[in-house]
Amino acid sequence: MTTASETGAVLTGDPREIQVTVDYLPAAEPFHHRYTPETLAETVREAAMKFFGVQDRQERDTYHYFLEIHGTRIQSSGVFRKCPHLS
């Protein structure tokens, strides 16, 4: 899968919140949600996967979705400061 264009995070009215946008190429629209900077990337990944109706699975091949920023994968246990993308 490929990702859509990448943008930075947008700070909201609360200085502790980050507006996260996750793009998924087959989707008609991106996932948007606000998170605190301490939110684990896995929490965002799970919410985005639910929004897009996808899940990790193994058939003949293994399908695992991950978040990335500017082409770099985010570790599930990590936190983020910029806009992640689902791949």
Image (cartoon, rainbow, N blue to C red):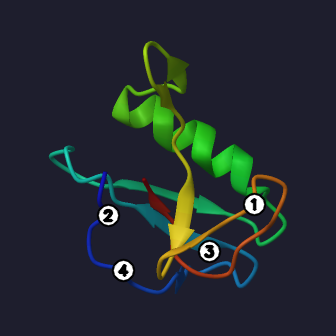
In three-dimensional space, the C-alpha distance between marks 1 and 3, rounded to whole angstroms, equals 18 Å
In the rendered image, the vertical position of residue 8 relative to residue 31, given as above or below: below
Dot in front, 2 or 4: 2
Comes first in the chain, label 3 or label 4: 4
Q: Is mark 2 on a helix, strand or loop?
A: loop
In the rendered image, the vertical position of residue 68 relative to residue 31, given as above or below: below
Q: Is mark 1 on a helix, strand or loop?
A: loop
Label 1 near label 4: C-beta < 8 Å?
no
Label 4 near label 2: C-beta < 8 Å?
yes
Q: Which labelled disc corresponds to residue 18?
A: 3
In three-dimensional space, the C-alpha distance between marks 4 and 1, rounded to whole angstroms, equals 18 Å
Comes first in the chain, label 2 or label 3: 2
Q: Which labelled disc corresponds to residue 75?
A: 1
Badge 1 amino acid: Gln
Q: Residues within 10 Å of mark 4 (few under 14, many from 20)?
A: some
Comes first in the chain, label 1 or label 2: 2
Badge 4 amino acid: Glu
Residue at 77% x, 72% y: name it.
37
Quarter where residue 47 is shown: top right
Residue at 71% x, 85% y: name it.
15
Badge 2 amino acid: Thr
In the rendered image, the vertical position of residue 70 relative to residue 65, given as above or below: below
Q: Left or right: where does residue 41 sit relative to residue 23?
A: right
Q: Which labelled disc corresponds to residue 6?
A: 4
Q: Left or right: where does residue 19 sit relative to residue 35?
A: left
User: Could you say which is closer to the camera, residue 24 or residue 16?
Assistant: 24
Residue at 49% x, 43% y: name it.
48
Residue 4 x/y as whole percent: 26, 68
Q: Left or right: where does residue 11 sit relative to residue 79?
A: left
- Residue that badge 2 annotates: 3
Badge 3 amino acid: Ile
Label 4 near label 3: C-beta < 8 Å?
no
